[in-house]
């Protein structure tokens, strides 16, 4: 019964950090939505298109995080069920250890699937960050140098040659 309990604790930690991720995705999507509305009111269609593309990415990211949470919760459910099946075996003295083993293995499978969803979402987040940086600072911002051949200050794009 100890192994499923440890898996429950570990999965619970993953749920907590995933809930933080989804909150950040929601908050950022709300910010971009407000910027999209403001750009539309200004008549800046190019910016509206860019922000709309970003909003689609945020929507997909939220779907991956939501799926990860679903699978983490299913894993916790299966780990709890395996603990209960172990307790039931002890109480009834009916030896069917394959039930608890199957539940733990299925829970571990869901744990792996959820983690894969978060890996995909993390890669999407990194790509979206690169897009946002390129949009704000220009596509070649990270390659710009000043007259002396040093990296230029990206905070002051006007001074960059």
Image: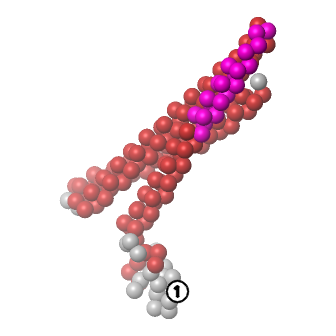
- The colour scheme applied to this rendered structure is secondary structure
The N terminus appears in which quarter of the rendering? top right
Most frequent secondary structure within the magenta stretch = helix
Residue 25 placement, left or right of 54? right
Residue visible at 57% across and 30% down?
A: 73
Q: Is residue 113 visible?
A: yes
In the image shown, does 60 or 40 lie closer to the viewer?
A: 60
Q: Position of residue 68 (x, y in %)?
A: 52, 38
Residue 86 placement, left or right of 152? right
What residue did someone put label 1 on? 150
Residue visible at 76% across and 13% down?
A: 95
* Up/down of 43 relative to 27, above or below: below
In the image shown, does 144 or 94 lie closer to the viewer?
A: 94
* Residue 79 lies in the magenta-colored region: no
Q: Position of residue 15 (x, y in %)?
A: 59, 37
In the image shown, does 34 or 78 lie closer to the viewer?
A: 78
* Range shown magenta: 93-112
The 10 Å Cα crowd at callout 1, few under 14, some 14 to 19, many 20 or more, is few
Give the SS element for disc 1: loop
* Residue 96 lies in the magenta-colored region: yes
| Residue lying at the far left of the rendered structure | 43
Residue visible at 43% across and 75% down?
A: 141
Q: Position of residue 10 (x, y in %)?
A: 68, 37
* Up/down of 132 relative to 28, above or below: below
Q: Position of residue 34 (x, y in %)?
A: 33, 51
Residue 77 placement, left or right of 58? right
| Residue 35 in which image quadrant | bottom left
In the image shown, does 115 or 30 lie closer to the viewer?
A: 115
| Residue lying at the far top of the rendered structure | 92
Q: Is residue 91 visible?
A: no
The C terminus appears in which quarter of the rendering? bottom left
């Amino acid at each position: 019964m100890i192994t499923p309990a440890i898996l429950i604790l570990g999965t619970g930690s993953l749920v907590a950090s995933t809930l933080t991720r989804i909150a950040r995705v929601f908050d950022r999507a709300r910010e971009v939505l407000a910027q999209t509305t403001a750009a539309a009111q200004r008549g800046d269609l190019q910016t509206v298109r860019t922000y709309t593309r970003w909003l689609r990415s945020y929507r997909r990211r939220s779907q991956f995080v939501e799926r990860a949470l679903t699978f983490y919760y299913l894993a916790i459910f299966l780990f709890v069920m395996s603990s209960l099946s172990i307790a039931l075996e002890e109480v009834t003295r009916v030896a069917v250890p394959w039930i608890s083993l199957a539940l733990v293995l299925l829970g571990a499978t869901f744990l792996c699937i959820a983690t894969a969803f978060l890996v995909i979402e993390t890669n999407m987040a990194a790509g979206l960050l690169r897009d946002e940086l390129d949009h704000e600072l220009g596509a070649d911002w990270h390659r710009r140098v000043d007259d002396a051949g040093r990296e230029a200050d990206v905070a002051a794009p006007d001074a960059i040659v």
